Image (cartoon, rainbow, N blue to C red):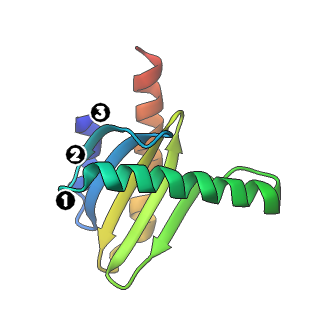
Amino acid sequence: METILQRLTDLEEVHDAILVGKDGLIVSGILHSEDEEVIGAMGAAAFGSIGDLTAQVHSSEARHVIVETKSGTIQMEEAGDLILIVTTQGSGNLGRVRVEMKKACRQLIDLVASY
């Protein structure tokens, strides 16, 4: 798992990559912050709330969430029973980050299924 996350953080745009359970517990992560547990819990809660909103409005599940801030983005994507959370800094190629996140999620789902 760490190898998959490391490949994400090797992208110029990506600052942090963390994998959390839907309960907010950390599975694996590469962060430049000591608030790993807080970020994981808040990210899982936010993704869950956005999922509830999309289910209510569009009768479907959220796939990928992008939160834009002044200094970068927070992107979240479901990977089976886990959530991949990636932060970026600056305005780099967000499409590339999204594509790489999708690839990482497929790999993570396959990896978890093999256990």
Relative to 109, is 32 above or below? Answer: below
Q: Which residue is mark 1?
A: 33
Q: Amino acid at mark 3?
A: Met
Q: With 27 as the anchor, is 84 left or right in this view?
A: right
Q: Position of residue 5 (x, y in %)?
A: 28, 44
Q: Which residue is mark 2?
A: 6
CA–CA distance between discs 2 and 1?
Answer: 16 Å
Q: Earlier in the sequence, mark 2 or mark 3?
A: 3
- 76, 109: nearer the viewer: 76
Q: Earlier in the sequence, mark 3 or mark 1?
A: 3
Residue at image location 43% in from the left, 56% down from the top:
42
Look at the numbered discs 3 and 1 and tell me whether their residues touch, using CB distance below 8 Å. Answer: no
Q: Amino acid at mark 2?
A: Gln
Q: Position of residue 15 (x, y in %)?
A: 24, 63
The secondary structure type at the circle numbered 2 is helix
- The N terminus, quarter of image: top left
Relative to 15, is 1 above or below? Answer: above
CA–CA distance between discs 3 and 1?
Answer: 19 Å
Residue at image location 80% in from the left, 58% down from the top:
56
Q: Within the image, what quadrant is residue 16 found in?
A: bottom left
Q: With 9 as the anchor, is 46 left or right in this view?
A: right
Residue farthest to the bottom, as pictured? 70
Relative to 103, is 95 above or below? Answer: below
Q: Position of residue 45 (x, y in %)?
A: 52, 53
Q: With 53 as the anchor, is 49 left or right in this view?
A: left
Crowd tier of the residue under label 1, counting other residues whose Cα lies within 10 Å: few below 14, some 14–19, many 20 or above = few
CA–CA distance between discs 2 and 3?
Answer: 9 Å
Q: Using the image, tell me which numbered label, if any, was put on residue 1.
A: 3
Mark whose residue sits in front, 3 or 1:
1
Q: Using the image, tell me which numbered label, if any, was put on residue 92.
A: none
